[in-house]
Image: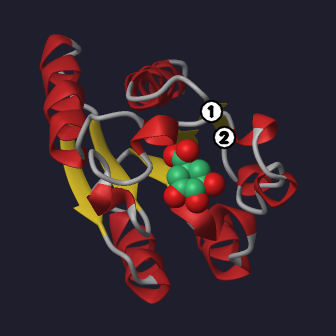
Amino acid sequence: MAKVLIVNGPNLNLLGTREPEVYGAVTLEDIEGLVGERARLRNADVSFFHSNHEGAIVDTLHEAVGTYDAVVFNPGALTHYSYALRDAVASIRIPVVEVHLSNIAAREEFRATSVIAPACTGQISGFGPDSYLLGLEAALAVLSRRP
Ligand code: DQA
């Protein structure tokens, strides 16, 4: 059974109340429920990690190796400037799918660049909570095509 870790960065714990006009009314707990449900249908095993702290996320990515087969990662605002997270993703030899609720290409200029995406297997952006489901599907597709 594929084991996938869903990692969420800064401020995503406030989903539901945070800028609902941008991110909608769904909470992080709701998203975890939806992803868990999809994982059961796909016969996959998912775990969840959230932190508002860059270093804690670096540690979690390092520790994912050996325990998880893939990571679905929403780095929040760290997406746009964290070279430490980019290097952490580049340092681990498991697929990482970057996901965003909002379409980062269609918002403020500073959000259009992800410094992390080039180190990831791919990026999914703009589908609200479905970005996580698509991210999980993408991770499972990558794993299923591995020799
Ligand atoms: C986000 C987009 C980021 O620009 C922002 O800082 C977030 C959320 C998203 O999921 O749309 O915190 O990653």
Q: Which residue is drawn at 73% across and 56% down?
A: 119
Q: Quadrant of residue 129?
A: top left
Residue 76 appears in the picture as rendered: yes
Q: In which quarter of the image is residue 86?
A: bottom right
Residue closest to the eye, 73 or 61: 73
Q: Which amino acid does label 1 sit on?
A: Ser
Image quadrant where one finds the C terminus: top right
Q: What element carries label 2?
A: loop
Residue closest to the eye, 16 or 98: 16
Q: Mark 2 points at which residue?
A: 121
Q: In which quarter of the image is residue 132?
A: top left
Q: Mark 1 points at which residue?
A: 125
Rendered view: 120 above or below 12: above
Image quadrant where one finds the N terminus: top left
Q: Residue at x 68, y 76 (%)?
A: 82
Q: Residue at x 36, y 73 (%)?
A: 60
Residue 18: x, y in percent? 37, 54
Rendered view: 115 above or below 138: below
Residue 96 appears in the picture as rendered: no
Q: Is mark 1 on a helix, strand or loop?
A: strand
Q: Which residue is drawn at 16% across and 11% down?
A: 41
- The reply to whether callout 1 and callout 2 are in contact (CB within 8 Å) is no
How many numbered marks does the figure carry? Answer: 2
Rendered view: 18 above or below 83: above
CB at disc 1 and ligand 1 closer than 8 Å:
yes
10 Å crowding of disc 2: few (<14), some (14-19), many (20+) = some
Measure how far apart labels 1 and 2 are at the Cα level. 14 Å
Residue 84's disc number: none
Q: Specify whether 59 is left or right of 27.
A: right
- Residue mark closest to the camera, 1 vs 2: 1
Q: Residue furthest bottom?
A: 55
Q: Which amino acid does label 2 sit on?
A: Thr
